[in-house]
Image (cartoon, rainbow, N blue to C red):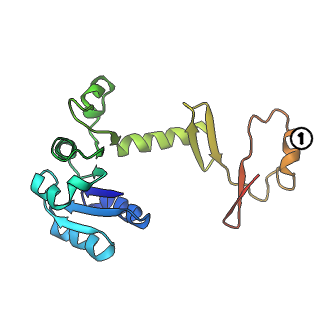
Amino acid sequence: MNIIICGAGRVGFTIAKQLSEQGHSITVIDPSSEDIQKIDDALDVKAIVGKGTYPSILEKANAAETDMIIAVTRNDEINMLICQIAFSIFKIPKKIARIRSQDYLNPKFTRVYNKENLPIDVIISPEIEIAKSIQRKLEAPGALDSVPFADNKIRLLEILINENCKLIDIKLNDLTKKHPNLDANIIGIIRDEKFLIS
């Protein structure tokens, strides 16, 4: 997949690293020659010094052949404008923007994010993601992680079992017999860094 990332700060660097390691063709754009140099030195990506809001810079990044653009600069308005230009001029199919201002994230104004107004397909909000992570921790105290599925009807929990746990030495098949009120299914175990499906 051809992906343009606008913003070479910590977030942009991390996204570029992960996506390039997955085999995607990545181009990173940022006005800071210093940040672009860091990315160019560390990652196997194309790095361009310039503003992602300039159509000529997006054209240089081969936006016409791009599948996705990810705008993660430090400025919400710039990220929104990048997505607008990517859609209007280059018809990039998938547009992702980091938006931090709660005013832009107000549910009353969500209709602004559509093809007729601001064509942003996915909004990344670090503050909301942190709040969701804290909420998941509070809903499942003791769990290392809690991931909701099916409109929060199903939860996948990651739980650390230490040597004092009463479940040790009980076969998984016998677990529901010994604990009939257990409203959970164990789908797997990570042991010695290997995932074993139960």
Vertical comparison of 50 with 89: above or below: below
Q: Nearer the viewer, residue 63 or 85?
A: 63
Residue 130: x and y in percent read: 43, 44
Q: Nearer the viewer, residue 64 or 113?
A: 64
Under circle 1, the secondary element is: helix
Residue 68, x across and y down, in percent: 31, 50
- Count of numbered tags: 1
Q: Residue at x 86, y 47 (%)?
A: 173
Residue farthest top in this picture: 108
| Quadrant of the image occupied by residue 146 | top right
Amino acid type at mark 1: Lys
Left or right: residue 64 compared with residue 196: left
Q: Is residue 141 left or right of residue 30?
A: right
Q: Residue at x 27, y 54 (%)?
A: 66
Q: Which residue is outermost to the bottom?
A: 41
| Quarter occupied by residue 113 | top left
The reply to whether residue 142 is visible in this rendering is no
Which residue is painted at 32% across and 74% down in the image? 42
Instruction: Determine if residue 40 is in view.
Output: yes
Closer to us: 185 or 86: 86
Q: Above or below — where is 158 with respect to 29?
A: above
The quarter in which the N terminus is drawn is: bottom left
**Residue, x 26% and y 38% (percent of image)?**
101
Which quadrant would residue 60 be assigned to in this image?
Answer: bottom left
Q: Position of residue 153 (x, y in %)?
A: 61, 30
At label 1, counting other C-alpha atoms closer than 10 Å, the crowd grade (few under 14, some 14-19, many 20 or more) is few
Q: Which residue is mark 1?
A: 178
- Left or right of residue 67: residue 148: right
